[in-house]
Image (cartoon, rainbow, N blue to C red):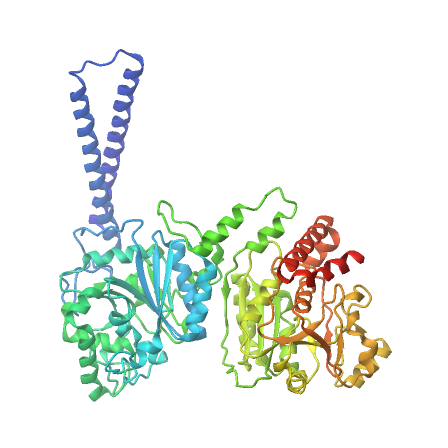
Amino acid sequence: MLRSWRVKLKLLLATVTLAVLLSWLYLFVGSLEYGRFLLLPPCLGEQPSRDVEREALASRVRRVEEENQQLRLQLSQAQAEGSDGSPQWGASAEDGDPPGGERSNRTACPKQRTVHKCELLHVAIVCAGHNASRDVVTLVKSILFHRKNPLHFHFITDSVAHQILQMLFQSWMVPSVHVSFYNADDLKAGTCPPFAPEVSWIPNKHYSGIYGLMKLTLTKALPSNLSKVIVLDTDITFATDIAELWAVFGKFSDKQVIGLVENQSDWYLGNLWKNHKPWPALGRGFNTGVILLLLDRLRRLGWEQMWRLTAERELMSMLSTSLADQDIFNAVIKQDPALVYRLPCFWNVQLSDHTRSEQCYTEVSDLKVIHWNSPKKLRVKNKHVEFFRNLYLTFLEYDGNLLRRELFGCASLPSPPSNQLQQALEELDEDDPCYDFRRQHLTQHRVHLFFLQYEFLALPNPTDVTLVAQLSMDRLQMLEAICKHWAGPISLALYMSDAEAQQFLRYAQASEVLSARRNVAYHIVYKEGQFYPINLLRNVALANTQTPYVFLTDIDFLPMYGLYDYLRNSIQQLELPQRKAALIVPAFETLHYRLTFPKSKAELLSMLDMGSLYTFRYHVWPKGHAPTDYAKWRTATVPYRVAWQPDFEPYVVVRRDCPKYDQRFVGFGWNKVSHIMELDAQEYELLVLPNAFMIHMPHAPSFDISKFRLSAGYRGCLQTLREEFHQDLSRRYGAAALKYLTAERSL
């Protein structure tokens, strides 16, 4: 305590001295400048002496400021010590610490290598599967929130994570962030002669499976010209700038190649239960959730052979790993302790049960990295778990759009898509009455594909069909009902904020109906802008289907029971693979929130006659579905062909490679009409199915339809977009498209 007050007093005196010197310098220089302005120029002989005085004074100020910084560091270390003078465990690490033994955490203010603000930092992460791809986003958010440097993420992924993360970063478009992917499947079994398996030969009991061993291969997997990298688990949360961790590389001795935090549980001490026999480790061992790797040194040391020989030797008695790569890293370090640099434990505060993590910090500001390394994750037992959980949830629900900020003072090379987007935005006329519509069309939305587990394997069935729809948070209640009506694969695009996506995740996981389905693909399109990007959502859901055919519908429609099987049979009977056709599913509606759903066409016709069902939108927009010819449908027993008419917007089954929806149409109006028009322009046959139907369920009007009804400007812009669409259609399809414009003008 006495030492702490002495340092405080020194710091106070140094601060006062610095303030006085700075004031003196300000007044001295100011008087010189004032003299130059009001008086005659000074004699030439006097100029050198004044320059010398200014330089000496500036040098004195710099020296006092350096001493001040040293005193601040000493003060922070003194405060970190207990009242009895004992240091906090793991508060710092020095090159000279005896491996595995007791050590002092005091330091004589070591010189730490500073990181240039524009230096590129490299981060490697192993990520496989849907759940890990979701978890890693929170880690990335926490890094981006604090970072001040350009970053290069190196992802070792399976095919699932590759698809998800590639689309996420491509659509996120964060400045000064580079992303590379490496195929984990190549590393599992090895692809280089003599095709020796890389890690698949190692038995592993850890829940991470074979992907928990991938970090052993990074010297081979990552580019040979990459000299160092920070390696992170997906269940990490950063509470500081990652550049601080990168700077620790500068503390490594000539022999140190791996930076690790000591394990904070008793696992490697072997006393957790009777006959507990862990892998060999130095003292408590080290945790590999956060690793600093000097790749160039590891390659020169023959790291591949080193860890492989160690693993082979230990597996003869251990038979398998319990903690995946961590066991093998520890066995290597036990054999050669000089390889490891001991990171202070606040760089990996391990929140598993029965750890010493609470000894890594005394204040919230001490926290650097939180590691949720228990299988219980957020349910782990810890005295401060509520604080840690809130910090994690902050990044979990943080709006990722806010992380698209440019780095101040660092020139970055924008990607071609970014250049094109920026140019298109600059060409917009802000005085255009429809500027908001055009701006929304150009908005780059973040997209997270396959947000939940998806295990549907597309069979070589040429008639299989996927239901495609889009929705927002206010339509979630329709999901369970649709899953009960449709047994086949479903592809959904959900328009949500980051926080809403987490609410949806909890809802889906708690639902018995939704959690039992593995053939429903949920694709999150994150909110941005003032209009609902309905056709973008449809295109995202459509692009990520795997079956030859798609049923293009809306989320507020319930398909008839058995429609999935009926459509597959119809596709086969009508020989659709050999023809270009769109199968129309007639649409009906009810005004009742509770409905006894008809089990057959006969029941539907009876309800239609009794007035409990209606043809869809017959009372507000009859021409949208009138060409379906409901009168003919009542008695039809075979599919019949209908002709396109203006404003026709049926729900159809088409091949997956059908035209995309036109994304200029946002909000309400003409989003389906334009699509059906293009199908007709491409000479699709429009065939009505005689024994298929779907029923629209009632709901409150959307915000966009309210704007359409109340705003003349909205309707005017929609008309402008329609005219521009007609012009584009004419350019693409020539004279054949003139009939659409003629038909529109005749109305």
Using residue 510 as the reference point, say whether residue 386 is left or right of it: left
Q: How many marks?
A: 0
The single residue placed furthest to the front in the displayed view is 735
Image quadrant where residue 677 sits: bottom right
The single residue placed furthest to the right in the displayed view is 610
Using residue 587 as the reference point, say whether residue 124 is left or right of it: left
Q: Residue 38 or 283: which is nearer the viewer?
A: 38
Q: Residue 37 or 97: which is nearer the viewer?
A: 37
Using residue 139 as the reference point, say whether residue 717 is left or right of it: right
Image quadrant where residue 22 sits: top left
Visible residue check, residue 635: yes
Q: Residue 641 or 115: which is nearer the viewer?
A: 641
Using residue 544 as the reference point, say whether residue 120 is left or right of it: left
Quarter containing the C terminus: bottom right
Using the image, determine if residue 43 lies above or below residue 557: above
Residue 512 x, y percent position in the rendering: 57, 81
Visible residue check, residue 666: no
Question: Residue, x 43% and y 64% (percent of image)?
Answer: 138
Using the image, determine if residue 464 lies above or below residue 646: below
Q: Residue 382 or 564: which is nearer the viewer?
A: 564
Residue 112 x, y percent position in the rendering: 21, 52
Residue 312 x, y percent position in the rendering: 20, 84
Question: Residue, x 45% and y 52% (percent of image)?
Answer: 419
Using the image, determine if residue 108 lies above or below residue 479: above
